[in-house]
Image: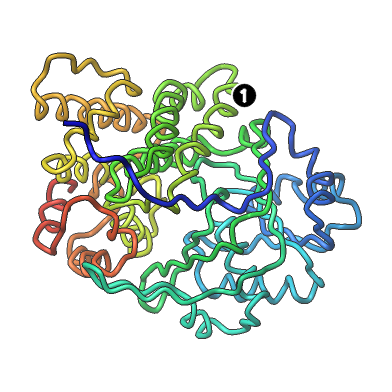
Amino acid sequence: MSADPLTGRFAYPRTAEVVYGPGSLAQLGEVAERIGAGRVFAIASATLVAEGLEDELRAALGDRLAGVFSGVRQHVPRESVIEAAGAAREAGAEALLSVGGGTPIDCAKAVDLCLAAGIEDAAALDDFHIRFTYPDKLEAPTLPDSAPPHIAVPTTLSGSEHTDLFGVTDRSRNEKDLYRGPAFAPRAVILDGELALRTPADLWAASGVRALDHAVEGTLSARHVPIMDALGAEALRILGRRLAESVDAAEPLAPRSECLLGAWLAIYALTNVGAGLSHAIGHQLAAEFDLMHGVTSAVMLPHVLRFNAPVVGERILRLAEPLGVDVEGLPEDEACARTIDALAALIHDLERFGVPHSLSAAGATRPELELVADRVLHDFGVQANPRPVGADDLARLFDAAW
């Protein structure tokens, strides 16, 4: 008997174009012209700005460049968003540009929300973030359906540039709130491997694990779709083969450029399928202990896969071939274990670049983990996890990852 035909719906991201290749930052002015970006206000990594990025942006944009803000802190605290939005208003911003990792990119999306919705104080952000209570109570406020155009230029593999989802941290609660609206996907993306060469090894490697996490959890999601299966597999092939090389090769330009493409494939469909438990845990671990999201993925992803394996074994086997794992003739449970072990080994190898793979090595402390577990069950990311999860399961996962 044949299987029932697949049914579903796929919403395409609103990004109009992706420009890629070494040196493509030089096309920034042309991209801004094509998408109708007027006065462009940049939100950028402080390190890049200190290295002279503003001069490069002015060379590409000329008088379009309205100003540069480099004061956003990791995990996008609300205060940074309000400060950046105020600076953008003062500069007369008509469009936004983000340059750097997930932090400046998410900050630019949040500033876009502030400009579109007239938000001038941090408390007003409460009206717009997603509220979720496990297993199925969801409140997703409607965000404005239009916003100033945003051009994103990533220098890590976080993938935020390809989604309409963004996170902002409320430091009073040490909790990351999620926001989502189609108007807040960057209108254009530039993937420049030359610019990415400036990213430090530990940050680049950790963000690569986050890209792996996008590909894996997108494939295993309870809402998986065929396009994610295909793109996720190719992302795993690229990242599995090129990630370590992109950090330590004598000539890293080609592998870094290719990894940027792998990160794009890994996250392209994620706003349709959702992520899963590794992401939900990662959001809250990162906010509580000030960890890079890639580090939380390095710590948690293999353990989450072992937790989910009893209900998604067949889908885990889809990861074997792109990861280069031979599971021919093995029973499903053994084949799954071998696939997960191979992924864990790939991640553990990155420890030589400064990416820890245990909670203790990452700097977590045990007393706060119970609070983190409660926040995970209120994190929208857990909704798409293929296996139900409770507080006791989270405690066991944290013990395994310690």
Name which residue type carries label 1. Leu
Residue 348 vertical position relative to residue 286 in the rendered view, above or below: above
Q: From the image, which quarter does the N terminus lie in?
A: top left
Q: What kind of element bears circle 1?
A: helix
Going by the image, does 83 lie left or right of 7? right
Task: Decide which of 229, 242 is in the foreground and name it.
Answer: 229
Going by the image, does 230 lie left or right of 182? left
Give how far across and how far down residue 378 sits, in percent. Answer: 28, 70
Residue sitting at x 43%, y 25%: 244
Image quadrant where residue 84 sits:
bottom right
Going by the image, does 350 lie left or right of 96? left
Residue 273 vertical position relative to residue 25 in the rendered view, above or below: below
Q: Dot 1 corresponds to which residue?
A: 253
Q: Residue furthest front?
A: 1
Going by the image, does 159 lie left or right of 324? right
Figure colour scheme: rainbow
Residue 303 vertical position relative to residue 21 in the rendered view, above or below: below
Residue sitting at x 54%, y 62%: 73
Give how far across and how far down residue 295 sits, in percent. Answer: 36, 46
Give how far across and how far down residue 34 sits, in percent. Answer: 81, 49
Residue sitting at x 60%, y 74%: 144
Image quadrant where residue 38 sits:
bottom right
Give how far across and how far down residue 197 sits, in percent. Answer: 62, 32
Residue sitting at x 14%, y 29%: 337
Task: Decide which of 29, 398 is in the foreground and name it.
Answer: 29
Q: Residues within 10 Å of mark 1 (few under 14, many from 20)?
A: many
Image quadrant where residue 384 sits:
bottom left
